[in-house]
Image: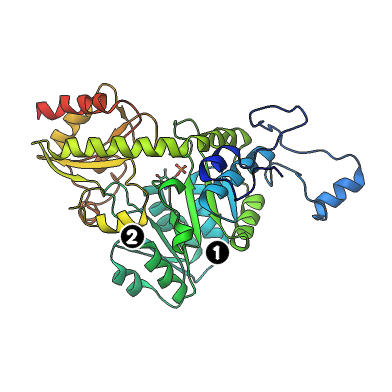
Amino acid sequence: MSQYDDIEYQLDTLAIRTGHTRSFEGEHAEPIFLTSSFTYANAAEAAAKFSGQVAGNIYSRFTNPTVAMFEKRLAALEGAERVVATSSGMAAIMAVCMSFLKTGDHVVCSRAVFGSTVALFEKYICKFGIAVDFVDLTDLCAWEAAIRPETKLLFLESPSNPLNEVADIRALADLAHAHQALLAIDNTLCTPILQKPLALGADLVVYSATKYLDGQGRTLGGAVAGSDKLLEDVFGYVRTTGPSMSPFNAWVVLKGLETLRLRMREHCANAEKVAEWLKQHPKVEHVYYAGFEDHPTHALAVVQQQGFGGIVSFKVYGGREQAWTIIDQTQMISITGNLGDAKSTITHPATTTHGKLSDEAKQRVGIDEGLIRLSVGLEDFNDIIRDLARGLDLI
Ligand SMILES: *Cc1c(COP(=O)(O)O)cnc(C)c1O
């Protein structure tokens, strides 16, 4: 399709050039094809395209050239045979479930996954007679013990949010495959720049493109990556049921991919500096950052990831009152549950992202009342710590 769809190019080049298809106008930047459907020169061409004899666009629920550019570019970064884009990260996870699970099947999922992912399994997937068990992300024995003959899918996020715990993806892939199950990884926090789960043996990777792939908080999007064989099923589900990505959103995240590596490098560098500053602060009881040697999964993060990411969580002495004071004293950092943005964001997980969990469940996943989660952005690091220092000095 384009001279850049060639694996001989280096990653930085692929991120900027892959998938680019110019229209007859010869425009320099990628065009947005804002069209619901496509036309044909004659009835015979329409018949050939509808039957699949001739490849080509028919309707944007199925394929769209701008969406295809995003899919190809992300596939190149991921080292995946194929990517299917979806309207959001949750739509990507739903697409995996609907494509590969049926009544009677069983799923094992890590406990520390995105809140809506827990709700998806517990409230909706369960309605179809599919059982789900939740286990501790880092406890390999627990994963093994939870597997049953009808287990078809292992699902996890690594690193976990907000505590940055890392799972041994290769070991879990071996475990899944020994039981004829698929391993799907939500790689939203690392992006393909910091971690390539397919190369570690995972079968499927899902993304919320809403976060780092866009990187500037502009749009919702999602994606599933994997082999041609598995992704054909995902494509069939998406084109039939309609959680397709809009061409405009595809264009936004497509342009986001061009700067992804530069941004991730700076997110990592800024996060490390913020984590180190927090660590030496007398009001901070603990910093959850996998770059520190005292983090429980530091050693694994070093070998499995190409960086420790942009999420830094910390626990202050005291509890909710102290944590809220720090949040309320910020003037620059955005108070929001979102993450993966050029703008730093701050949130109190116990009363927002994890607010629906019971006290016991919060305890089990380590969501303390004194815990604060930062998504460290790309602002000057000195301004970020000054914004945090204001509240820390008051408590
Ligand atoms: C945000 C997020 C999701 C859900 O993505 P949406 O685009 O909001 O649907 C899933 N997983 C993780 C890790 C996320 O951060």
Q: Is the distance from the Cβ of mark 1 to the nearest ligand 1 atom less than 8 Å?
A: no
Identify which amino acid the numbered label 2 is placed on. Ala
Residue under pointer 1: 100
Query: Is residue 391 rendered to the left or right of residue 245?
Result: left
Q: Nearer the viewer, residue 25 or 251?
A: 25
From the viewer's perspective, is 143 left or right of 386?
right
Question: In terms of sequence position, does the residue under pointer 2 or pointer 1 come before the other?
Answer: 1
**At x 34% / y 63%, what residue is drawn?**
168
Q: Nearer the viewer, mark 2 or mark 1?
A: 2
Q: Position of residue 173 (x, y in %)?
A: 43, 67
Name the residue at 14% across, 34% down: 321
Residue 254 sits above or below residue 193 on the image: above
Q: Give residue 155's position: percent from left, percent from top.
A: 42, 60
Percent x, y for residue 234? Answer: 60, 56
Image height of 108 relative to 73, above or below: below
Q: In the figure, is residue 111 to the left or right of 363?
A: right
Q: Nearer the viewer, residue 194 or 97?
A: 194
Reading the image, the residue beneath label 2 is: 167
